[in-house]
Image (tube, rainbow, N blue to C red):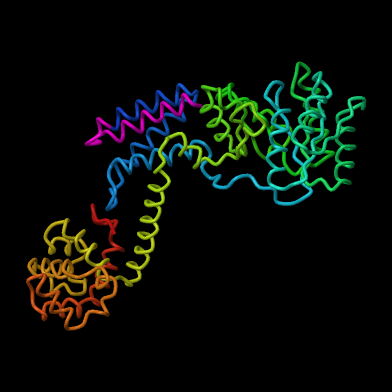
Amino acid sequence: MESLRASLLGVVEKIRNSVLLDTRDVDAIIRDLQRVLLKADVDVKLVFDLSERIKKRFFSQEIPSGFSKRDVLIKILYEELVTLLGGENTTPYVVPKTPYTIMLVGIEGSGKTTTAAKLAKYFKEQGYRVGLIAADTYRPGAHDQLKQLAEKIGVYFYGNPHSKTPLAIVEEGVKELTSKNVQILIIDTAGRHKDEEALMREVVEIHESLKPDDVMLIIDATLGKEVSRQAAAFHERIPLGHVIITKLDGSARGGGALSAVAATGARIAFIGTGEKLEDLEPFVPQKFVARLLGMPDLEALIKRFQAVEAVERERAKLIASGKITLLDLKEQLLEVRKLGPLSKVLEMLGGSSLPLKGSIEGSEEEFDKWIAIMNSMTQEELLKPEIIDRSRMMRIARGSGTSVRDVRKLLDSYHQMRKLVRQLYRSRRRIPGLNL
């Protein structure tokens, strides 16, 4: 994944160094991004769809106050990559109850036995009593390997290489470990081999008897987008709860594996990032993408956007109900001013049916005077008009080149103007360019 990360860093750097970010610049950046994702073995259709969404969102989105075009494009890139990798998963994997049984399945060579030990170590470090059950009777040395790993990390182990069937081992193991108050039981089943159908029947048999709380499919990242076929093949036989992707550290096709799994709707619970037992981490798309983009300040940037969006949503509700401050009124009047002469705006909204039409129609000087008055107010006054007394009116009048009478007139009109703004809000879809 280091190759993917380095390539994405190049895309981010290109965004940061862009001055205009016009159509030509964005097309060049999108082409670079497409090359990066295709090289990582992400499906062509997924790459094309993501590219189109990024362009459409960027050119249709207004730039919020306090942000640059670069900020907006980086935010969109981040959000679309998160969506590509399974977006809805915002919290690490949790165990909802104890005892809890996890059944691991996968093809031979996917790193399932090592992953079982990694998973056991992860849960042990969270304070759980963990046990491993060796149910792979096909691969020579599978029992001994898992036993040694269990001893190394200090967790419970059950295995019986002389037992007749894997199902018997699982049933015996669950009974014995449960009697020892083991809270999480992890079952390592055999990987698929040449006798695939017989093995799949065996996996189904264990699942039907055990009824595990979760089934985790172990997938090798080096297979790229082909992993979706594995996930589908297993899911046809047994319900998959989660996926663990291994060997992500050394795979140039890791992006394809991650996106292919996400496209199936399966949730990726963990990723293997190395050969050591501690090299297993919960997969949270947001954190993973932030690390790929290599921006220490990305989290702060996203939080700033989220804060602005939350405020705008709340203000939209207030405006719709007429509960607005002078700051809201000022910003909305500035938006109306951009549309041209006020009389033309009033005609677009229905003309004579509007309140205050007679008092402001054609009065461009009055309109601009109100803007000047509000520009002379402090932030506190704009947010809390009720604190404006005569002393404050005198100061505001001096600062705006108007009179106290003008300031009072604006304040007297404030409650009526809320009705106008509410009607503007409701009519926003009928007026091109009006953003309320």
Q: Position of residue 98 (x, y in %)?
A: 77, 50
Is the stretch drawn in magenta largely helix, strand or loop?
helix
Residue lying at 33% horizontally and 72% vertically, measured from the top left: 323
In which quadrant of the rendered view does residue 342 lie?
bottom left
Residue lying at 45% horizontally and 39% vertically, measured from the top left: 290
In which quadrant of the rendered view does residue 72 lie?
top left
53 relative to 215 in the view: left or right: left
In which quadrant of the rendered view does residue 346 lie?
bottom left
Q: Quadrant of the C terminus?
A: bottom left
Q: Give whichever of 92, 297 is nearer the camera.
A: 297
19 relative to 403 in the view: left or right: right
Q: Position of residue 35 (x, y in %)?
A: 40, 23
**Residue bounds of the magenta highlight:** 1-25
344 relative to 287 in the view: left or right: left
Q: How many marks?
A: 0
Residue lying at 11% horizontally and 77% vertically, measured from the top left: 406
